[in-house]
Amino acid sequence: MSTTFFDSLTHVTRDGSWIGERTYDASLPALLRDMDAAGAARALLVSIAGYVDNEVILESAHAHPSRFVPIAGLNPHILATTRRVDAVVRQIKAQGYAGIKLHPRLNGYDPLDPKMIAAVESCGEQGLVVLLDTLFRRKGLATRHAPDVIDHLAGACPDTRMLLLHGTGPTMMELYEIVRCNDNLLLDLSFTIMRYRGSQRLDDDMRFLCATTDQLVTVGSDWPEYTPAATLERFAALTQGIEPHRIANILHRNLERWFPQATAAG
């Protein structure tokens, strides 16, 4: 297996807490140690609006430009108008971020809210990548079928590159049918590869994707909740016997196409 790893999803916080708790050490030194221990060359360093300050993401990426690509968190729901959404996206681009993270579940909005769609469309116009958390369901609110939501977004914003974090979990094969028809989509297995381990059906689905659709798939740790080393160990077990060039595409080449080293260096 290729030892190069470009982690699709990591986070840090200034005080090292994570989602208001101390269960994990989410500090930058801890992340660097875990990346070094796993041989992870680079990572997307990702903010979450309301949970991680954008500033610490940008500062950390500037301190280690060869390791991190900064992704800003954005909650379009709290902005007054779609015009204001566009202005904020433009500001994010000017500040040096390579993309935005949208998290409808944690930020409590409909993933097909007009301001959400405006953010995705604006990112396409500005050349920013959208990292979309695709696990939309939350308590107390009926949620539309995740692949259908993404199908709508892809149709509404065909020029926007979207990294579909967690691959919609249990419905990843339905998402695959959408991704393979859209050149600007990547299906990401971060979190899902660890959270659903032991489910034979999902293990088979993930192995199928890695063996046949390697140019459309990425994987990440979702650090600090999982480590790069544990993720790579799980990935290796899942992909035994798959050709090395396919493994390399999933582990680093697909993300390198979207985030070449010059982008990370700012």
Image (cartoon, rainbow, N blue to C red):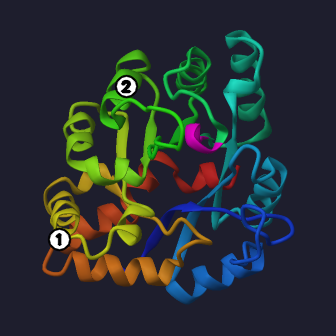
Residue at the bottom extreme, as displayed? 37
Left or right of 30 in this view: 108: left
Q: Is residue 146 magenta?
A: no
**Element marked by disc 1:** helix
Q: Residue at the location (59% across, 69% down)?
A: 223
Q: Nearer the viewer, residue 44 or 257?
A: 44
| Residue 134 x %, y % | 44, 43
Q: Which mark is residue 184?
A: none
Q: Position of residue 139 (x, y in %)?
A: 53, 44
Q: Nearer the viewer, residue 124 or 173?
A: 173
Q: Is residue 1 visible?
A: no
Q: Which residues are magenta?
A: 102-106
Tell me: residue 61, above or below residue 185. Answer: below
Q: Quadrant of residue 243?
A: bottom left
**Going 74% across and 42% down the picture, which residue do you hit?**
96
Identify the disc placed on residue 200.
Answer: 1
- Nearest the eye: 187 or 198: 198
Q: Main SS of the magenta segment?
A: helix
In depth, the one of 24 and 239 nearer the eye is 24
The image position of residue 122, as x and y in percent, is 59, 20
SS for callout 2 = helix
Report the residue at 75% width, 25% height from top.
Answer: 78
Question: How crowded is the residue under tag 1: few (<14 C-alpha within 10 Å), some, or many (20+)?
Answer: few
Is 240 placed above or below 216 here?
below
**Residue 154: image tag:** 2
Going from N to C along the chain, the mark reached first, 2 or 1, is 2
Q: Residue at x 44, y 32 (%)?
A: 142
